[in-house]
Amino acid sequence: MTATRVLVLNSGSSSVKYQLLDMRDSSRLAVGLVERIGEETSGLKHTPLANGGASREQTGPIADHEAALKAVAAELARDGLGLDSPELAAIGHRVVHGGRHFTEPTVIDDTVVAEIERLIPVAPLHNPANLTGIRTARVLRPDLPQVAVFDTAFHTTMPESAARYAIDVRTADEHRIRRYGFHGTSHAYVSRATAHLLGKDPSEVNVIVLHLGNGASASAVRAGRCVDTSMGLTPLEGLVMGTRSGDTDPAVIFHLARVGGMSIDEIDTLLNKKSGLIGLCGDNDMREIRRRIDQGGEDAEQARLAFDIYIHRLRKYIGAYYAVLGRVDAVVFTAGVGENAAPVREAAVAGLEGLGLAVDADRNAVRSGEPRLVSPEGARVAVAVVPTDEELEIATQTYALVESGKSE
Ligand code: ADP
């Protein structure tokens, strides 16, 4: 029997998201989520899509990631999809930070684990959680190929002129301070899918990708390679996000410390968790912000200001990346806001006809899960909506690596 299944694991500090895919047709056999690991009220939701089954949910203490993965394995086994199945080809792990070292998906061994560990100082929140998932999965299936797919990998092609901050070179190098970028798996998948939507090979097109979820980032992709992206050393830089400020004058931090008396940890929390849309208007969900604006009245004012600041920053990045690329074939919107919020897409390109950018109102209003054009017929630059699929991309990269290893 050929092994064609890939389990994709996305391990966060207190959660594990997973999907089991069959790579013969990229179909999803099961999806699920373990939340609140380490608490009394941990929850597991498992949906066996292959068997058309209804979701199964359980709550109760799940002590750690090992217990979480064992619970996931038990759920999969109930559907005949267990981790011990000979049809399982590999496990693909999402790893947030691969530094400069990991430019491609990589089969995990002890050296790779050590290197991901070495990157913890630049990804203190994410890499430890990703590592816990990797270690646990390796204990459960030591014989199975496990692959790390890095959020940063797609951005490692950025030239030094885009990747470096203009700070003292020796200090920057000593502390590995540079722009790494994140959401790379999504930018890679969406830029490629956009080329296909245009009937072109990725090497033939220049694309600006706007990944607008709760976290948000933009990238400039020339002929399939990333040449700039808006997130930097950490995911804090760039666009206005759900709870992150994006770009600010770094001196805001000195000011808050010296004049505001805040600690570094307090400022970290302020800029990462209490800023962006939620800091501006009390809501981080674009649906709620649009509802407040559409309802009007007093409640609309702050929501409108938050929306305008969000759009202003987005337009600045579209303009910047237009200049970085010189020629742009497509601007593409993806992730929760990008795929669903027609008013955001409309406002982002309003008045940019001079750059060849416009949306057609009817096309933009269509709701669909399919990749589609929203620009007018015959537009010089395509404006597109392409739903992202990070799990499929991780599974595809994982499977390709494992298969190529076999033929060597
Ligand atoms: P992440 O993966 O970063 O958590 P998603 O890509 O799932 O985020 O995007 C989540 C966000 O998408 C929500 O916070 C919300 O603002 C936005 N969103 C989801 N559906 C809609 C919608 N129908 N209209 C506007 N915004 C939406």
Image (spheres, rainbow, N blue to C red):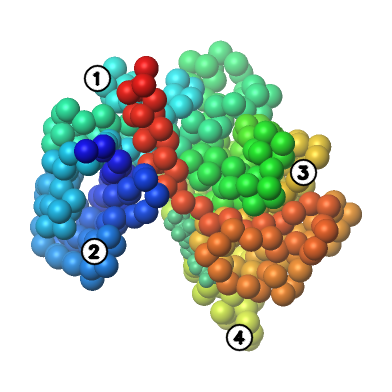
Query: Which residue has dot 4 on it?
Result: 295
Horizontal arrangement in the rendering, residue 67 relative to residue 303 (left or right): left
Q: Distance between the Cα atoms at labels 4 and 3?
A: 37 Å
Q: Nearer the viewer, mark 2 or mark 4?
A: 2
Query: Which residue has dot 3 on it?
Result: 328
Q: Amino acid at mark 2?
A: Asn
Sequence-earlier tag: 2 or 4? 2
Q: Is residue 281 visible?
A: no
Q: Distance between the Cα atoms at labels 3 and 1?
A: 42 Å
Q: Residue 110's mark?
A: 1
Which structural element holds mark 1? Answer: helix
For disc 2, the neighbor class at 10 Å (few under 14, some 14 to 19, many from 20) is few
Horizontal arrangement in the rendering, residue 365 relative to residue 28 (left or right): right
**Residue nearest the viewer, comparing 161 with 205:** 205
For disc 4, the neighbor class at 10 Å (few under 14, some 14 to 19, many from 20) is few
Q: Amino acid at mark 4?
A: Gln
Q: Decide: marks 3, 1 in contact (CB < 8 A)?
A: no
Query: Which residue has dot 2 on it?
Result: 51
Q: Distance between the Cα atoms at labels 3 and 2?
A: 44 Å
Q: Nearer the viewer, mark 4 or mark 3?
A: 3
Residue 33 picture location, percent across and down: 26, 57
- Is 293 rendered above or below residue 139? below
**Residue nearest the viewer, comparing 294 with 84:** 84
Which structural element holds mark 2? Answer: loop
Q: Amino acid at mark 3?
A: Val
Q: Is residue 78 visible?
A: yes
Sequence-earlier tag: 3 or 2? 2
Which structural element holds mark 4? Answer: helix
- Is 173 rendered above or below residue 127? above
